[in-house]
Amino acid sequence: AVGGGTGLSVLLRGLKKYTSNITAIVTVADDGGGSGVLREDLGMLPPGDIRNCILALADTEPIMEQLLQYRFQEGTLKGQSFGNLLIAAMNGISDSFEEAIRKISDVLAVTGEVLPVTLEDVILYAKLKNGVIVKGESQIPQKVKELRSGIEEVFLHPEDAKPLEEAVEAIHRADVVILGPGSLYTSVMPNLLVADISKAIKESKALKVYAANVMTQPGETDGYGVWQHVQAIIHHMKGNAIDYVFVNNEEIPQEILRKYAVDGSKPIYLTPKDRRILMKKGIQIVEAPLIDIKKHYIRHNAYRLSEMIINLVSERKNACSKKENFFSASSKKREKRSS
């Protein structure tokens, strides 16, 4: 599962119900909030997205999760989460950030594995359609709104940042690689820009799934439909590798939509044009009711989405097994006739 932010952690909570064989590959381009402060002060990789993924896969009591997600309300630590500080402390007593994450995962009995996509100090940039270059993941949505110009493309500095070898290996041995859900340009895309990650995904024999967002994201994907999300991924990967797109077709209550409309966010549904283009590209579409509304916030129904993806992988394995058995039986018959 490749991504970051809230989207990836929500999906992981669903996936761990069906399998323990999970690798989360997480962006480290975050430079805002508490993560940004620790990144600047301690020179470490930002821990926020990784913290959320570890907690999503952890076997912990609710009180422990509350503790790790707690944000200080006063003083110099105001806005900082205790979980970030714990990762920072573990990083201080470890030989590397990767080792620190592994130790935290052991302490919290994490199902599967959480990996930073790279150990290098990467910065995300965006080139807007008006030609302006924006530096920093946290600045991109703000500048898009301020300048009223959409994102043309995003890129990393350094451009040749090396991926974590374990991340590339996990992609090569995977049964399925899932992109999203989550912020298209600031959570999913930074992973695909790390050298060899997109290449590994394209080379992998796994099923490649994109879980399309349920709502547009102000400052990132204003006015985007399903195809525009997929098109942006294809552009940044320099080629198509997506086999399936999962799209929500469940109606969202109007009172919830009105709340999101205040910020300029709109629901994303498959249009006839989206369908035609995706089918022409050889990308299969899976439509289903995929939303979960909690405390007036729209999220993916992680359990339903995960179950459907796991079923898709199982069907593929069964089909391959039958095919192998057929060819094996045919080969034995030919050998018998020959003898």
Image (cartoon, grey):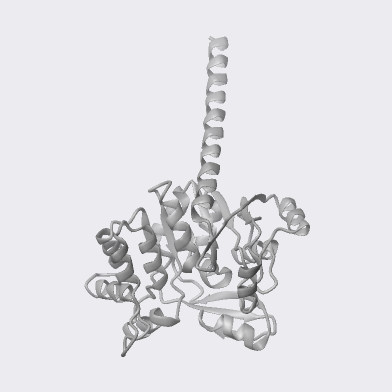
Q: Residue furthest left?
A: 93
- Image position of 304 with respect to 60: above or below: above
Res 185 quadrant in image: bottom right
154 displayed left or right of 24: right
Callout count:
0
Residue 206 in view in this figure: no
For this rendering, which residue is in front, 65 or 91? Answer: 65
231 displayed left or right of 113: right
Q: Residue at x 70, y 72 (%)?
A: 223
Please state the horizontal and vertical placement of residue 188, each as a whole percent of the image: 53, 66
Q: Residue at x 36, y 56 (%)?
A: 113
- Image position of 311 with respect to 162: above or below: above
For this rendering, which residue is in front, 329 or 88? Answer: 88
330 displayed left or right of 303: right
Q: Residue furthest bottom?
A: 75
For this rendering, which residue is in front, 1 or 80? Answer: 80
- Image position of 72 with respect to 5: above or below: below
Please state the horizontal and vertical placement of residue 312, each as a whole percent of the image: 55, 43
For this rendering, which residue is in front, 302 or 41? Answer: 302
227 displayed left or right of 156: right
Please state the horizontal and vertical placement of residue 107, each as a whole percent of the image: 25, 61
